[in-house]
Structures are given as C-alpha cells and as structure tokens.
Image (cartoon, rainbow, N blue to C red):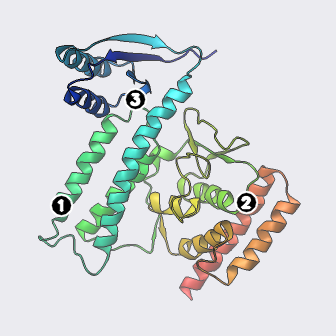
Amino acid sequence: MVQPKKWLVLIHQIPPKPDALRVKIWRRLQQVGAVAIKQSVYVMPLTEQAREDLSWTLRQIVEGGGDGSISEARFVQGLSDEQILALFHNARKADYEKLIQEAGTLYAQWSSQESDPRDPAVKGPAQLSRLQRRLDDISAIDFFRTPERAAADLQLKALEKLLAGAPAADTDTVDGFADLKGKTWVTRGNLFVDRLACSWLIRRFVDGKAALKFVPDPEYLPQTNEIRFDMFDGEYTHQGDLCTFEVMIQRLQIRDHALGPLSEVVHDIDLKDEKFGRSETFGFNALLTGLVAEHPGDNERMNEGFRLFDNLYAYFNRQKRE
C-alpha cells in the first residue's frame, strides 16, 4: 500500500481589520506557493524551505494581531493526496498559461515585419529578461513539475531564437520535450477526431513511446505523472474557438508546415463551424466516421486512426513541396 504524502499545514486566524494585513498574508502565501484547502487553511509539501516560508508567514500573522499554527500532516480520509496535487498543478498551470499567452503575443509581434526585437526601441532583451525572471519565479514554486512548464520553456526558447536573429525553420521539432517524456497522457474514451489527432501528435512529435490512457469520467483527476487532454479542466483542452489539437500545437511550439492545414481539417470536423472549409474535410470526416463504426474499441480505433493521420500529414507535406 502506498503511504500518504506528508504535508505542512498552516491554520491561521487574522483580525478582520485592518484589511491590509489580510491582503499582505494572502500575497505572501501566493508568493511561496502555498495552496488553500479551506478558508484560512494552507498546504505546502514537507520541505525545509516550505517550513521556513510558512514560519515567517506565521510570524507576520502574529505580529499583526492574529494567531495560527503549523502542523505536519497526512491526509488519510476525505481530501486525497491526488486532489491536493491537482490544486498545486492548477495553481501553477494558471501562472504558466498567463506567461505563455504573453510570450505568444510577443512572438507574433517579433515575427511580423512591423517589429524587430533587435531594434533598441523595441527593448527585446529587456522584455525577454522580464519573462525569464517570471518563469524562474514560477518554477521555484512548481513543486510537482506542472506539464505547462515545458511549453513555457519552449515559448521562451523561440523568443531567444528570434532575438538572436535565427531564421525560422519550416519544420521545427526541437527536442525540448524532456519534461513531457515518460508521462501518461489521459483523455476521454470513445475517441474521435480531436482526441485521435492529439494522441497522434503526442506520439509523433512529443514522445514516441508515450502511454495513452482512455477513461470514462470527463472530470477525471490526474494521478502522478499523468497529463490530461481534451477533457474537463485538462492541462490541454479547448480554448476560445480553438480545438485541443490547435491548442497543443501552439502551446508546444511545434512549427511544421503540414500541421497548419491538418489542424484546419481537425478544427472544422470537431467544432462543425466550417471556419476553414478545406476540400479535404468532408472526405476525412467520412473516413473517421467509418473508423468509429468498424472499431468500437479505443485501442484499435487509435491504431487505425494513426494511419489515417499519417496519410493526411504526408499528403499536406507533399502539397507543400510541389
């Protein structure tokens, strides 16, 4: 039987006035990476650094007229270790996604003809340094290696290349996925276009030996070393009008000219909005529908589906060369 993890738990009580103390303590807990499991109850992993951070925070609370205590604890009923880990992942996921979005905006600006990151007026090095410092700060409190960390690293590496004046390659599959290798990728069962496409992308570009797991529960909580995609609150899922396949390509910074038209086909089949209207979409949808009818099991459907995506990818590759 796996022993429960041991945690540090801060329980505190702060006077309602002044408001400044409550805000100060809340910000301090955010800065050190603590997560709330109930009102005024915060958790951190059991490390010496965490013990020091919470001790200083408790001293500030007491000096401000409040009180509290720090305990070492194991959760054996009710709240599980997996649920606590999910709280830490979600907290850092939000931090990384905000950074990725800002870096992506900067990448789009620097890639355009209107902005040169090496122009002193643009202040490219200063902007990149600011983002790198933020990444370092987030990584320092990313105690359980949130999957979005790898995507943030790749985004900043792409900015470094632009700043150095390196030409953008037509196909860029930089081996920057070390943090994502050896993971188990989890998605909903009954595979169809978006989940098939994402599974294919993971195996082809991220980790050729990646384990894929299909679950019935759309609100499945990930276990250690698992990454969810195309499911509720997943690490990779729909954003705005983008399907999960498009989100993964952007977040992982995979630059391959054949993935552009391929993602448009997946988008129109998945979202049914005819946004791109490619001529290949109707036929590929028919093939996938036949695949589902012929192979009710997800593993067989995945294996056959990968062949379809390999063929469509090869087709778009050939189109580009011609």
Question: Residue at 39% of width from left, 16% of height from top?
Answer: 9
10 Å neighbourhood of mark 3: few (<14), some, or many (≥20)? some
Secondary structure beneath disc 2? loop
CA separation in Å, label 2 and label 3: 36 Å
CA separation in Å, label 3 and label 1: 33 Å
Secondary structure beneath disc 3? strand
10 Å neighbourhood of mark 2: few (<14), some, or many (≥20)? many
- Ranked by sequence position, the earlier of labels 3 and 1 is 3
Residue 153 in sight from this viewpoint: no
Q: Amino acid at mark 1?
A: Pro
Q: Say left or right for 250 vs 224.
A: left
10 Å neighbourhood of mark 1: few (<14), some, or many (≥20)? some
Extreme residue toward the bottom, this view: 322
User: Which residue lies under the disc numbered 2?
Assistant: 192
Spot occupied by residue 199 in the image (x, y as percentages of width and height): 64, 55
Q: Amino acid at mark 3?
A: Val
Label drawn at residue 35: 3
Q: Amino acid at mark 2?
A: Phe
- Ranked by sequence position, the earlier of labels 1 and 2 is 1
Q: Are marks 3 and 1 in contact (CB under 8 Å)?
A: no
Label drawn at residue 125: 1
Spot occupied by residue 288 in the image (x, y as percentages of width and height): 77, 67
- Ranked by sequence position, the earlier of labels 2 and 3 is 3
Q: Are marks 1 and 2 in contact (CB under 8 Å)?
A: no
Question: Residue at 74% of width from left, 62% of height from top?
Answer: 305
Q: Is residue 150 or residue 290 the one in the foreground?
A: 290
Q: Is residue 22 or residue 83 the one in the foreground?
A: 22
Closer mark to the observer between disc 1 and disc 2: 2
Label drawn at residue 181: none
Secondary structure beneath disc 1? helix
